Amino acid sequence: MKIFVLVMLSLSTLLVGCDRDALDGLNLKINADIKSSYDKEAEEIKKDQSSEKTDKTPSEMVENLTKTVQKTIETKKEEISNSEVANKKSVGSSNTENDPDAPIPFKEITECSKAGITAKTNEIFYADNSHLKSIDSKNEQQLKQWKKIYSEVEKNCN
């Protein structure tokens, strides 16, 4: 048994170890998912700096770097302010349409609809039978009593 496990372990190691292209592709996919917009901006800054002349003094390089950082900060501030304005407009125009967490508006059940009749019947039935939590569908006496109350409530609506 130990020999079989060792042979399977060595074969699986050799098979997986030989397929480096698959492992590299898998690794690239993981790296692509992790990269964020901040990484992209940092890469753009590095490209801009490498494309410029390298004979600049350190003070000029620092000035260029601060300018690029200020530009990115300004663009982020504009994006945030634009999104806040858009959110305020959407909240002001219609709160219930855009907010998925808003409670469902309350609609009263009309008394003479099927749901209203059923609700009123349940109120009366459970007021008379306070020891019950629910109607047993196999108990014919409870069903008859409930149906009798239902018919009375229905007659009152008509």
Image (tube, rainbow, N blue to C red):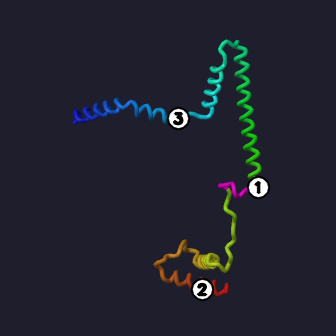
- The answer to which of marks 1 and 2 sits earlier in the sequence is 1
- Where does residue 149 sit, x and y in percent of width and height? 60, 83
4 lies above or below 136: above
Q: Which residues are magenta?
A: 93-101
Q: Which mark is residue 158?
A: none
Which of pointers 3 and 2 indicates the residue nearer the eye? 3
Q: Residue at x 73, y 19 (%)?
A: 63
Q: Nearer the viewer, residue 49 or 110?
A: 49
Question: Please, what is the three-letter code of the amino acid marked with disc 3?
Answer: Ala
124 lies above or below 102: below
Under circle 2, the secondary element is helix
Under circle 1, the secondary element is helix
Residue occupied by mark 1: 93
- The answer to which of marks 1 and 3 sits earlier in the sequence is 3
Snapshot quadrant of residue 75: top right
Residue occupied by mark 2: 151
* Mark 3 Cα-neighbour bin, 10 Å: few <14, some 14–19, many ≥20: few
Q: Answer with left or right where residue 29 lies relative to residue 128.
A: left
The answer to whether one can see residue 103 in this image is: yes
Q: CA distance from mark 3 to mark 2?
A: 67 Å
93 lies above or below 73: below
Q: Nearer the viewer, residue 81 or 10?
A: 81
Q: Residue at x 72, y 16 (%)?
A: 60
Q: CA distance from mark 1 to mark 2?
A: 46 Å
Q: Answer with left or right where residue 15 lies relative to residue 50.
A: left
Q: Residue at x 71, y 35 (%)?
A: 76
- The answer to which of marks 3 and 2 sits earlier in the sequence is 3
In reply to whether residue 97 is colored magenta, the answer given is yes
Residue occupied by mark 3: 32
Question: Please, what is the three-letter code of the amino acid marked with disc 2?
Answer: Ser
114 lies above or below 48: below
Look at the numbered discs 1 and 2 and tell me whether their residues touch, using CB distance below 8 Å: no
